[in-house]
Amino acid sequence: MMSSKHLRGDINYSWPTGEIAVMGPGGAIEVLYGKEIENIDDAGKQTACIKEKEKAYKDIFANPYNAAKYGYIDDVIEPRNTRFRVIRALQSLATKKLINPAKKHSNIPL
């Protein structure tokens, strides 16, 4: 994800295939289950274990529906509706007024 509500993104959408997580499934599985996977002797079983763990990670953590549930993104949209939703979002932001709090101190010369 390139932006989020935490980074003050105004509107955040995702397609249903989007992976929204801190890291990709491959890297996460290496970190979380690396020693367990190393202890498997058979290469076929090792690969099957990795695939199973990656699928579980995607289903639980790296899907846009969980991100929408927690408010990290505004909506999960179909790719065919992307143009319409982006145009509508930009139209709603055309009149946005950004009001930041007053600065306490000016920038000091460095």
Image (cartoon, rainbow, N blue to C red):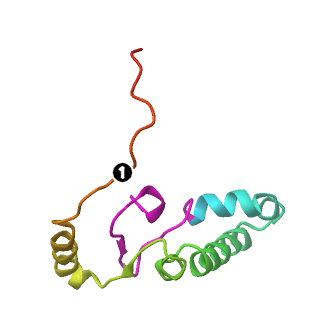
Q: Is residue 6 magenta?
A: yes
> Is 29 located above or below residue 83 in the figure?
above
Looking at the image, residue 61 sits to the left or right of residue 78; the answer is right
| The magenta segment | 1-24
Residue at the spot 22% in from the left edge and 64% down from the top edge: 96
Q: Nearer the viewer, residue 57 or 51?
A: 57
Q: Position of residue 8 (x, y in %)?
A: 40, 58
> Is 79 located above or below residue 28 in the figure?
below
Identify residue for label 1.
100
Looking at the image, residue 103 sits to the left or right of residue 22; the answer is left
Determine the image quadrant of residue 60.
bottom right
Residue at the spot 32% in from the left edge and 83% down from the top edge: 77
The quadrant of the rendering that contains the N terminus is bottom left
Residue at the spot 81% in from the left edge and 64% down from the top edge: 36
The quadrant of the rendering that contains the C terminus is top left
Residue at the spot 38% in from the left edge and 44% down from the top edge: 102
Looking at the image, residue 80 sits to the left or right of residue 11; the answer is left
Q: Position of residue 66 (x, y in %)?
A: 54, 80
Q: Amino acid at mark 1?
A: Asn
Majority secondary structure in the magenta region = loop
Q: Is residue 3 magenta?
A: yes
For the view shown, which residue lies furthest in the right direction? 39
Q: Position of residue 16 (x, y in %)?
A: 40, 82
Q: Nearer the viewer, residue 36 or 20?
A: 20
> Is 13 located above or below residue 102 in the figure?
below
